[in-house]
Image (tube, rainbow, N blue to C red):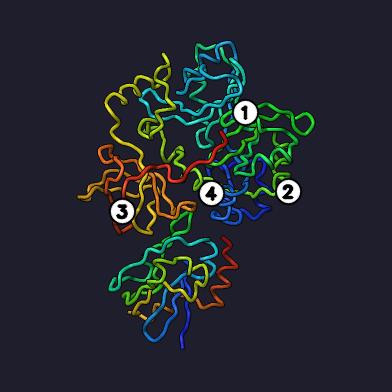
Amino acid sequence: MSKIYYAETHEYIRVEGNEGYVGITDYAQKALGNVVYVDMPEVGDEFEAGDDFGAIESVKAASDLICPASGEVVEVNDALVDNPRLINEDAMKNWIIKISISDEAELDDLMDLEAYEKYLESNPH
Amino acid sequence: MEENKKTCLHDKHVALGALMSPFGGFDMPIQYEGIIEEHNAVRNACGIFDVSHMGEVFISGPQADAYVNYIFTNDILSVEPGQCLYGMMLHEHGGTVDDLLVYKRNSNDYLLVINASNIDKDVAWIMKNAEGYDVVIDHRSDELGEIAVQGPLAEEIVQKVLGLSLSHLSFYTFGEFTIYGDKPAIISRTGYTGEDGFEIYTDHESTRRLWDELLAAGAKPCGLGCRDTLRFEVGLPLYGDELDDDITPVESGLSMFVKVDKPEFIGREAIIKQKEEGPKKKVVGLEILDRAIARHGAEVLDADDNVIGTVTTGYRGISVDKSIAMALIDARFAARDTQLKVRVRRKVFPAVVIAKKFYKKSYKK
């Protein structure tokens, strides 16, 4: 069973056991438009919740990717290197990095789907 | 904070669902459907841009020939009425006040089209330097709208909408027309995309009507997002990126628009000296040998990781499927095929100097 948590900066983390798959939400991919490059970290890099772990670029601009929970990168989604548009096709399926979560209590600071949808409604961009 | 100005088409952009963003002091459409779709429409069919934010300054009077030739780098005395000329206004030190189009309406009668972000600076500069010249300076940016119609189908669509014949206009010429009964319009065969097309200046009411009619005739609304990718791919400069108060046209590779043979114009001595000595920095094209995109401000490094310049504009090309950039770098590294590097956030990628005309223009001759 996995559970998905959402951050105000429009990343998600899908948690399975003590590992989490981090990507951007469907709302974020739509707002960005055509993704042309994903700048990903290396396996073994460690991030705190709130750190930049990379960037995602549309034609117009680069947006920072913010790590929703602290942990170490155990895998990066290599398919995005040659085909960054996979994110536009299915942002939830095409995660960017997989981390080992170092502090599960941090997940309580994130939103569930219902709260994230309410957040989107109350924060029109 | 001062509120951004709105062009006469602002409500139409909002109604079309455009993503709006501040540019040059105006709230402007960045994209409607998407940058890639709009970019391709201009390359393959026809796109229209609201460029009413651009500034228009009319200069006339007994000494207008002499005055415009004094503030402008290109030689307006060398061309006939009906011709447009691209060039710059320079500081004494050679840095660029603005790059602009000058329309020669007649001897002693000119229209200068200047960048939105520089309107206040340019008008002040034009007024200051006019001291002692018998000229009339008429700043009409707030009265005139401007639409750019760009792409291989531009001629067909504009002719159909306005019921005018424009095929006689060659590249960089213009005509003065009457449209919609009694409205004066200036129509030039010019643009900023590397494609054939027109720029149409008329009053706000006619601009609004023209916009709707161009859309109805099949032109695609295009935002400033693709205007930038289009001009960048054909190596055209944007003021603020490849030109500014501290960048000379020589450094930006635009010497051909600076006629140092003219006896006098502001900045002439500095440009002559720089051409003799060779510029210390130059704008070059770069291909990034990776998918990473080096954007404005990214550092350019030599083989030993010394910073030798910065990127001025960079994109994943749309018509050119590569990561490409223009960069202002130490002139010693400006030769084609020089191996360099760029720093994008915390990573460094290899890059190579290439020609900055990444995509071939297709102007009508």
Residue located at (29% from left, 40% from top):
B335
**Any mark on residue B174, and which?**
1
Labels 4 and 2 in the same subunit:
yes
Q: Which of pointers 4 and 3 lies earlier in the amino acid sequence?
A: 4
The local crowd at label 2, few if under 14, some if 14 to 19, many if 20 or more residues have their Cα within 10 Å, is: few
Label 3: which residue?
B343
Label 4: which residue?
B226
The C terminus of chain B lies in which quarter of the figure?
A: top right
The local crowd at label 1, few if under 14, some if 14 to 19, many if 20 or more residues have their Cα within 10 Å, is: many
Residue located at (27% from left, 49% from top):
B340
Left or right side of B217 for A5: left
Counting from the top left corner in percent of width and height, residue B200 is at: 65, 35
Does the residue at mark 3 contact the one at mark 1 (Cβ under 8 Å)? Answer: no
> Would you identify the image quadrant in which residue B329 lies?
top left
Counting from the top left corner in percent of width and height, residue B93 is at: 35, 25
As drawn, B19 above or below B143: below
Front position among marks 3 and 2: 2
Q: Which of pointers 3 and 2 lies earlier in the amino acid sequence?
A: 2
Circle 2: element type: helix
Label 2: which residue?
B216
The local crowd at label 3, few if under 14, some if 14 to 19, many if 20 or more residues have their Cα within 10 Å, is: many
As drawn, B331 above or below A101: above
Q: Chain of mark 3?
A: B
Which three-letter amino acid code belongs to the residue tagged 1? Phe
Circle 1: element type: strand
Which three-letter amino acid code belongs to the residue tagged 4? Cys
Which three-letter amino acid code belongs to the residue tagged 2? Ala
Q: Chain of mark 2?
A: B
Q: Which of pointers 4 and 1 lies earlier in the amino acid sequence?
A: 1
